[in-house]
Amino acid sequence: MRTTLLAVALTLAGVLVLTGCPGQRAPEELASPDPTLPSEQPIAEGSGEGLGRVLTAVPCGVAGPYGDICEIMKTTDPAIDMQADVANTMVLNRKLVDGKGSCDAYLAMGNVEVEALEKVGKVARAVPVAGMGLGLIVAKGNPLGIKSIADLANDNVKAVAIARPNSSVGFCAEQALKNAGVWSAVEAKLARPDAPSELKSFVMKGKADAAIIYNTCLVEVHTPGQQRQEEGQGVSTKLQDVGLIDQQLYEPFSLQVVVPTDAQNPAGAEAFIRACLSEAGQKIFADWSYIPLKPDAEAGKPEA
């Protein structure tokens, strides 16, 4: 199915102008997502006909499920033109915050990103479409024998990579370390790249012994239509997944579809939201290691 994605006419265009990362967020400013939000926010119904171009700002790590969901949208509206600006999540967020770009829908990777847009009045509506979590990774073979977040306090662990708190993955990583009681032992050896996308490379290049990442990062692809990375492919040849970090240690966060206040095709954005929340959409997210909001959605078998 994924090989037919080119027919969706995804345009990987640099629609927005490159800028820097947003400023740090204060911990007390973060609000927990409401898991009932999708059902409480009514989604406009429609036939899907004549939606035309739908420009979506897509963080590179979300390109996989985005592409698969575009395929199911094509079945309901063959004329729909799903176009994507695929870029680093921090780049996309800053461009939208600064008003240097626009889109019809934006896949925001957590609460911190959404609240940065809300502060500048750029959010018409934001709908959670899949849950996310934190994962712990180490170098292949796990040379230091790290088994949990508690082991990051061990003396033989010299550097731990986490993102900065102006991203949800960085903010929640700080929460997890503090709530696990290891912050004081780990703070001095933190390595903090400018972008979450650099966390994996810090471990691969030996700049960190471990990293706290989005749990989806080891299977992500950066081009819509590609199949997910499996064990023995891509970065998994150099990195090892220790496992999910206990979700009780940090505030829950979710992948959210943001419809900006200046969206040119809000109806198209609503169609995208409906597709994300459909049974097929939720199964796609589960297949890419996201946490489906609908409990009956289970991951299918990876395609050969």
Image: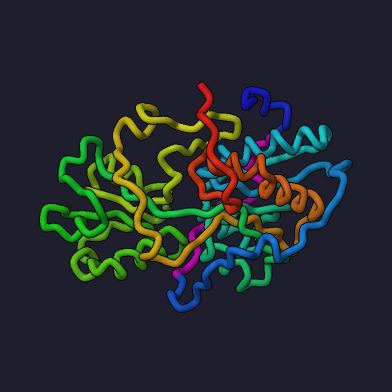
Q: Is residue 109 left or right of residue 125?
A: left
As rendered, which of 119 and 47 lies closer to the eye? Answer: 47
| Number of marks in picture | 0
Q: Residue at x 75, y 45 (%)?
A: 54
Q: Residue at x 71, y 66 (%)?
A: 40
Q: Is residue 206 above or below residue 93?
A: above
Residue 9 image point, x, y percent: 72, 32
Q: Is residue 12 magenta?
A: yes
* Start-end of magenta stretch: 10-24
Asked whether, in this view, residue 220 is left or right of residue 103, the answer is left
- Looking at this view, name the residue that lies furthest to the bottom: 28
Residue ID at (26%, 60%): 190
At x 76%, y 34%, the residue is 74
Main SS type for the magenta part?
loop
Q: Quadrant of the N terminus?
A: top right
Which residue is the extreme one toward the top?
304
Residue 219: where, in percent of width, then height?
Answer: 45, 37
